[in-house]
Structures are given as C-alpha cells and as structure tokens.
Image (cartoon, rainbow, N blue to C red):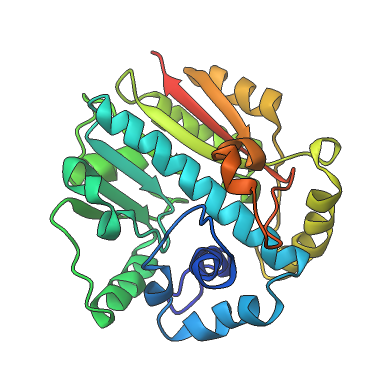
Amino acid sequence: MNHDGEPSQTALMAAAARAAHLIVDDEPKIFADTLAYELLGDRAEELVGYHRAHGTHLVLSGARAAAVTRSRYTEDRLAEAIRGGIDQYVILGAGLDSYAYRAEPAGQVRVFEVDHPATQRWKRRKLEDAGIAAPGAVTFVPLDFETESLLDHLVHHGFDPSRPAFVSWLGVTMYLTREAIGQTLAVIGGLAPGTEVVADSMLPEDLRDEAGQAYVEAVMPVSAGGGEPWLTFLGPDGMASLLKEHGFDVMGHARQRDAVDAALWNRSDTLRPQDLSLLTHARASR
C-alpha cells in the first residue's frame, strides 16, 4: 500500500495486466476481468498504455500470462468448491480483485475481501466513481496484517469459522518470509475441515525456464527498489511441506501451462506460459 492508500504497485500492475489481456491479446481469452480497467480509475490508461505500446515485451506479456492464469485457475477451483457446497470465499490481500462485482455465482457465496483499510477505502471510491454497486454478498474486512488477527476480524465481520471456506492468497508469498507464510497458513489450516486454499509462489531458480529466469532478472530488482523485495521461492516440494506442516492435504500443483485448458495456449499472439510461478490447491484436513 502506498502512503495515500493507493494499492501497492504490484496490485496495480496485476490489475493492469488483467485489463490489458482483453485489449492487447488475441482470442482465445484466458480470463475476462471486465472490471479491471474501471477499477484502475485515473491510472488505467497510463498502466494499460504500457501494454498497448509494448505488449510483446517479455516482462509485459509475462505479467499478463501470470495474472490471467492464476485468476482463471483460482476461480475455476472456486466454482468447483461452490458446487460442492462451500458458501464462504475469503480473498486475502484482495487489492483490485473484481470477482464479487462481475461473477454470476457471487450470489451463491459470501465474499470476504481482506485488505488494509486505506486500500479498501481507495477501492470503494473507485467502485463508486465507476458506478459499480457492491452487492450485499460482499463484506470488506479491514485488516493491518502486521498487527491484527485475521481470524478475529473475519469473525467480527460475519465469517462463520464452523463452516468450511474457500481462500485465495495470490501474489503475496514471494514478499514474505517462510515463517510469515507459515503463520498465515496456520490460521487458514485452523478453519473448519474441508476449507480449501489456492496460493501461488515464485519458483526457485532451478525450476524456472529461460523465459521465467529472464522475467525474474528484469523484475525482481525493480520490485526491491520499490520497497517490495522478493524473499521466498517455493516449488512443489517446498509448498507441499509448508502446507502439510499446517494441516493441509495438497490437491494439486499447476504451473502456468497446466493451470488452464491446453486449447487456450493455441494462440496467434505472443502470450506464452512461463515456468515462473506455481499455483497450489490444498484442503484443510484437521
């Protein structure tokens, strides 16, 4: 979060990548975030403009591939969970996530958007400016992650810890220490049995391909210079170990190529999967 409450540069760039995918990339579309552009407010044209002008650049096409595959994978797993009876969805570090405002199944699930209070105020202003009404099924849960209890704040805002939930935790773990990741997983793992989580991680260097390594070499120093250093890299074994330690059974891992239907990679544009990041789906078993 920036000092004026604007979401972090990472959150803005992710939203810009989702918005730009619908503008820059050809069919088939991997993920349709039809509200991302509007939620960027007066930053939209600036941030999406980079993709318009330089969309074939490895970093920008890589950002789009990462953003849309993780969103598509997560919402596909969420849809399966809703069909299985889960009716609580917790978005940790919600940023400019737009699920609650565009997805038809949103009426079947109560959405808890957890983020810093200043970031939430910024987002709510952008929603209002765009004329997007917050549905009754969405609840904003303001939380200072460094000093306040996630579970206490969820329960205070109507979350039922006796019933399983689906939790998404995207674009965060690389900025945390392994210990901090474990602390959050301990909270999620302590929710009702059957609770599911999808989290992503940056792959260690020995598991990246050439394009993934080039992306890291270009972006990691810039992120660190902006006050958001990458601290932790987790492959399938490392993520599975952390999850098992905190009461989860791993249901699956997916790299970008495997995160979506293979037909979506039959493309005429420059959007390509990279071995850069990992998505992990797990279920709390205790």
Viewed as shown, does residue 7 lie left or right of 131? right
Position of residue 241 relative to residue 74, above or below, is above
- Residue 144 percent coordinates (x, y): 40, 55
Residue 171 visible in the picture: no
Viewed as shown, does residue 71 lie left or right of 114? right
- Residue 185 percent coordinates (x, y): 48, 31
- Residue 125 percent coordinates (x, y): 29, 77
Task: Using the rendered view, name the quadrant where residue 215 is placed.
Answer: bottom right
State the quadrant of the C terminus. Answer: top left
Residue at far top of view? 286
Position of residue 243 relative to residue 256, above or below, is above
Viewed as shown, does residue 66 lie left or right of 208? left
Is 196 or 4 nearer to us in this picture?
196
Task: Using the rendered view, name the quadrant where residue 243 is placed.
Answer: top right
Number of numbered tags placed on the structure image: 0
Residue at x 81%, y 52% (from the top left corner): 211
Is 259 or 148 nearer to us in this picture?
259
Residue 40 visible in the picture: yes
Residue at x 19%, y 44% (from the top left corner): 156
Position of residue 96 relative to residue 156, above or below, is below
Residue at x 26%, y 29% (from the top left corner): 83
